[in-house]
Structures are given as structure tokens and as C-alpha cells.
Image (cartoon, rainbow, N blue to C red):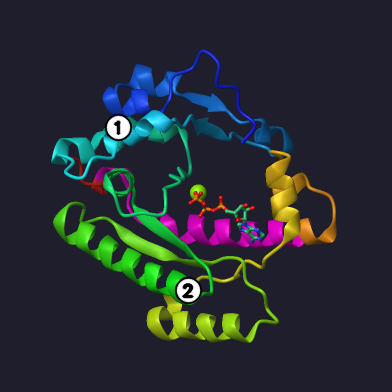
Amino acid sequence: MDIQVAGRLNVADVLANPKEKVVRQAITSSGWAKAHPGTIDVMIGSPSAINFDGPHPSVRDVWKLEEALATIENDYDLVLIDCAPSLNALTRTAWAASDRVVVVTEPGLFSVAAADRALRAIEEIRRGLSPRLQPLGIVVNRVRPQSIEHQFRIKELRDMFGPLVLSPQLPERTSLQQAQGAAKPLHIWPGDSAQELAADFDALLERVLRTGRITAPDEAPRP
Ligand SMILES: Nc1ncnc2c1ncn2[C@@H]1O[C@H](COP(=O)(O)OP(=O)(O)OP(=O)(O)O)[C@@H](O)[C@H]1O
Ligand SMILES: [Mg+2]
């Protein structure tokens, strides 16, 4: 995301002490904003966040990120929380801070099964912890349109999850890996391949902004 981390705090500090002052010191501006109008900020990650990933988080722990983000969320139109691909304490902490969950999957057998597990887990958290939480949809990534197996799995996803399967689906593209490797936004990467994929991401963002903004801030339950 093209950020400078020197002298800043990070998400582990925020989880330890979710006060506005700490939150603001853990956020920095992204160099990606150079290619875009508007603001793109990043809360700095840290391997130390694993210390908050114990098997039995308390209810208070699970709401820490929500508490932290509530202090600054009015500054932003959209907050994306990138989770590890597991349903552990940190993911539940992220979901407690969220209105909607986007599940990213690939058109393969194990990925389809994992998407199913993720949606069940969202439902469980919605019932037990956070009534406002809902799945926003499933993004299908790394699609090879010529693959019969991929076509079969995409149909399986549609049969299982219906309109939750979002369009467009994202193709497998080397240009994404090149842009990632150079730590540059896909949107400024040269070539038609990168620009087509960038347009797909724009269409998904449009969809997220349109359907995601359902809960007004005063309706959002607080711990
Ligand atoms: N559409 C795509 N086309 C080509 N490569 C892709 C695509 N999507 C992801 N990749 C590649 O797959 C790898 C993993 O991608 P990414 O980091 O986005 O996945 P992740 O699920 O968030 O992984 P992690 O579990 O490590 O967080 C990266 O090398 C990335 O470049
Ligand atoms: Mg990741």
C-alpha cells in the first residue's frame, strides 16, 4: 500500500489500547492516493497482532477494534478490514467491527467448501454477537474462463449461494502479481490486462458502496 511505518504505532497497539490518540498514531496515508482523488489511509499491520488471536477471546476483546474504529470512522466513506483466511479470534474481532463481510473464494473444491463455512460462521456471529452483521457477497477470484472445472465450480457457487455470488468475477492475471510485486496500485499499471482487472475492481467497489451502506451510524449497535 506504499506506506511509511517508521515512528508510527500499529494495529497491535490499537488492540491493546483502543483510544482515539493511539488509533490516529497507527494510521498513515497511502502513496496510492497519489493516483486517485481523495484519501486512502492505512492502519499499519503488525505480526504482534497474533498476541490477540488466542482461542478464547473475551467479549470485551472481540469488540476492541469496533471501539477503536468508532473513534475515527466518520472520517471515512469505507473501511476495509483485511482478514487472514481463518475463523479465529482476530477475524471475529474484525467482524464485530463490521457491517458487512465480503468472502473471497476461488473456483476450486476446497475454496467452495471454505466459502460455505465462512457464511455459516457469519450467521453464527450475527446470531450470537452482532445482529447488524451480514454477508455482502462472495467475490470469485483467479478465474480461468477456459477451464471447465472453474465453470463447474462457479455454477456450484451460484446454485449454493444465488445472488450472493458477486459480479464481475476476477480473472487470473499476471499483471496483478506484477503490480503487487512493485507495490503499485493495479490502476496505474500499464497494459490492457491490468486496466481490465482494475475496471473489475472498480465495479466491485461500486457494488460494495451501493449495497454496503445500509446501517446508519446511529442504528449500529455498540457493545
Ligand atoms: N486474480 C489474480 N490473478 C493472479 N494472481 C492472483 C490473483 N489474485 C491473487 N493472486 C496472487 O495470489 C497470491 C495471494 O494473493 P493474496 O495475498 O491477495 O491472497 P490472500 O488470500 O489475501 O492471502 P493471505 O492468506 O496470505 O492473506 C499473491 O501472490 C497474488 O498475487
Ligand atoms: Mg490476505
The quadrant of the picture occupied by the C terminus is top left
Q: Is residue 69 above or below residue 6?
A: below
**What is the quadrant of residue 192 in the picture?**
bottom right
- SS assignment at label 1: helix
Residue at numbered disc 1: 51
State the residue in front, 133 or 87: 87
- Residue at 53%, 80% in the rendered image: 154
Q: Is residue 87 above or below residue 29?
A: below
State the residue in front, 46 or 22: 46
Kindly identify the amino acid type of the residue bearing the numbered disc 1: Asn
Q: What number of labels is visible?
A: 2
Residue 113 is left or right of residue 104, and the answer is left
Residue 201 is left or right of residue 213, and the answer is right
- Whether 198 is among the magenta residues is yes
Residue at numbered disc 2: 165
- Whether 87 is among the magenta residues is no
The quadrant of the picture occupied by the N terminus is top right
Q: Residue 110: image x %, image y %?
A: 44, 72
State the residue in front, 85 or 70: 85
Q: Overall secondary structure of the magenta stretch?
A: helix
Q: Residue 105: image x %, image y %?
A: 49, 66
Q: Is residue 70 visible?
A: no
Q: Residue 20: image x %, image y %?
A: 34, 21
Q: Looking at the image, is mark 2 or mark 1 earlier in the sequence?
A: 1
- Label 2 CA crowd tier, 10 Å (few <14, some 14–19, many 20+): many
Report the Cα–Cα distance between label 2 and label 1.
34 Å
